Amino acid sequence: MSTDTAAVRAGEELNKEALVAYLAGKIDGAENLTIEQFPGGHSNLTYLLRTPAREYVLRRGPLGPVAPKAHDMAREYKVLKAVHPYFQPAPEVFHLCEDPAVVGAVFFVMERRHGIVVRDRVPPELAAFPDYPQRVSRGFVDCLVELHSVDIQKHGLISLGKPDGFLYRQVHGWFDRWIRAKTVEIPLMDRVIQWLTDHLPASPTPTLVHNDFKLDNVMLNLQDPGRIEAVLDWEMATVGDPLVDLGLILCYWAQPSDPGGTKASITAMPGWYTRDELIGRYARETGRDLSLINYYEVFALFKLAVVLQQIYVRFYRGQTQDERFRHFDKRVINLLQQAAALI
């Protein structure tokens, strides 16, 4: 199987000496630590810590100034600690460091799981399985159903969020993020914001909400790609309207009828569920009314546009020199055009 880590990117190195000293006595074999980096992601930085005893994953926030309340590693640690006992795909966490002096930011250490992560191409270890598109599609939706079926009252998880008024706060909170991050006026964005304000739906019964549930944030089991080995990136998880998660999936999930280039293309290949099939299976398994799911997909496209703008503004202001971000402003416009078309 191909490796999923690489050498640490220039400028994103951890202070190994300080980290080893800090982790001594906290994780097994810290004194013989080696560090690699997981290359995926545009914001939070994720590293593999390898010791003679076992492997761990370290997560920290991005370099440079970040939006208020974004990239809250302490909160992600606390969410995982609460959710892991009741939802097996949530990795176990071991240690939180809230002293930014150690590696330059708050970080936490969690278990390392092995599996297949699908990003911009189908890995050969996944392509070896017959009918993998159907199996992954089904397992992916069923994992979301499982997450949304966790009993938040019984397990005391309701304290992870404030479900009353959740969707209203989400929508208006993302409006505020846009205002803080925008670099030019975009009339199309103003129209999308007005529509989201005017058409706010009543939410179903609250559940756990991952808030970033997408194909490249899950890890597939190496023996059965229809089983989700891990769900990653819990920093935005909360309790609220479950259809926010489903809307985000639709925002990312390409199908053959899409115009070229608007979404990642893997799920547009033969055999993958269409967006209607995803919605249909989720509706059958949960019994939830999805008649207003269009709203949630528009909201997801809007949120993604804001996230990319938050990344772009850091490049625009010279707070990062990462060339991957240079043309994110064009991607923002593309997402807004998709949202307007759905409206």
Image: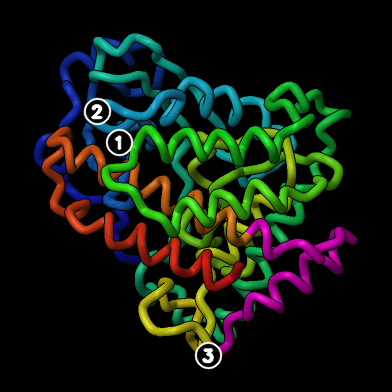
Instruction: Name the mark on residue 270.
Output: 3
Mark 3: amino acid: Pro
Range of magenta residues? 270-296
Residue tagged by mark 2? 33
- The picture quadrant where one finds residue 324 is bottom left
In three-dimensional space, the C-alpha distance between marks 2 and 3, rounded to whole angstroms, equals 44 Å
In three-dimensional space, the C-alpha distance between marks 1 and 2, rounded to whole angstroms, equals 6 Å
Q: Is residue 22 left or right of residue 158?
A: left
- Percent x, y of residue 165: 75, 32
**Which badge, 1 or 2, comes first in the chain's sequence?**
2
**Which badge, 2 or 3, comes first in the chain's sequence?**
2
Which residue is located at x 57 percent, y 69 percent? 225
Work out whether 106 lies above or below 101. Answer: below
Work out whether 284 lies above or below 134. Answer: above
Mark 2: amino acid: Leu
Which residue is located at x 46 percent, y 82 percent? 128
Nearer-the-camera pick, 301 or 107: 301
